Amino acid sequence: MLQNCKTGTKEKMDISYIAIIISFIAIIGPLFAAFFSRRNVRHQALLNIHKDFRSPEMLSALDGIWKFYRDIKKKQPGLENEPLKFNEILKEEYIIIHKKQRNDIANNVLKAEKSLNHKRRYITHFYVHLASLYKHKMLPPKMIFDWWVPSDLKIINDLIIPLQEAASELCEPEHLEITSEELKFSLEPLLKLVYDGKLYYDENKKNQISKYNIYKKT
């Protein structure tokens, strides 16, 4: 009789342990699944963004937009220490070129994808997408800022923002590419990307650069 009680108690304890283990798995399982799913989403997002960044269209757009920037610097020597004035000249030159090329496109003299405005839009959309992924924590700082260092993000302040402002200024009200409030909304994540990228670089470069010679010697 006593033996039967002990056996029954042991069976109940075994069942309780099994129930606890099943409950534990039921709780932990979805957490693991969510963790690995998130990692896969991040990995895929990074692959996609790199594919876009290395595309021939991006290389062509970057080459064209930086050529425009360098040409303005050659025409306006001595403005290195006057960024606000340089930005105004940059915007004025962009508006002149954009209006001419818009007419050339309308008259079938120029293909739209060859225009400076097309190149600007292509690059802007890429960096806005990158900033949005960062803003919504789809890609963590390490995933972004190990690839895009401050010199890569320099284009945001030097070209993307002033040219986006110029593009918004030159349009007629009914053809506005983006309203002033929408402009601020879309540009703020870009500015945060630049700011956080510099912070990340400053915080990590000392440790990373200090090891450079060690790795180089191996």
Image: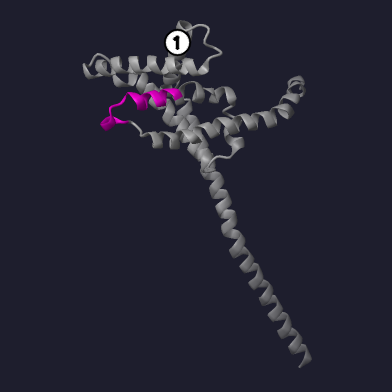
Secondary structure type for disc 1: helix
Q: Name the residue under label 1.
A: 72
Amino acid type assigned to the residue bearing label 1 in the image: Ile
**Residue drawn 66% across the image and 70% down it:** 20
Closer to the camera in the image, 183 or 3: 183
Location of the N terminus (image quadrant): bottom right
- Please tell me how crowded label 1 is: few (under 14), some (14-19), or many (20+) other residues with Cα within 10 Å: some
Q: Where is residue 14 in the image (x, y as percent from the top left)?
A: 70, 76
Residue, x 25% and y 17% (percent of image)?
103
- Along the horizontal axis of the image, is 152 left or right of 126? right
Q: Is residue 173 magenta?
A: yes
Magenta region, residue range: 162-176
Q: Position of residue 109 (x, y in %)?
A: 24, 13
Q: In this view, does 116 lie to the left or right of 49?
A: left
On the image, the x and y values in percent for residue 185 come to 44, 37
Main SS, magenta region, reads: helix
Taking 93 as reference, is 212 above or below it?
below
Residue 123, image quadrant? top left
| Viewer-nearest residue: 189 or 134 | 189
**201 left or right, relative to 136:** right
**Residue 174 forms part of the magenta stretch:** yes
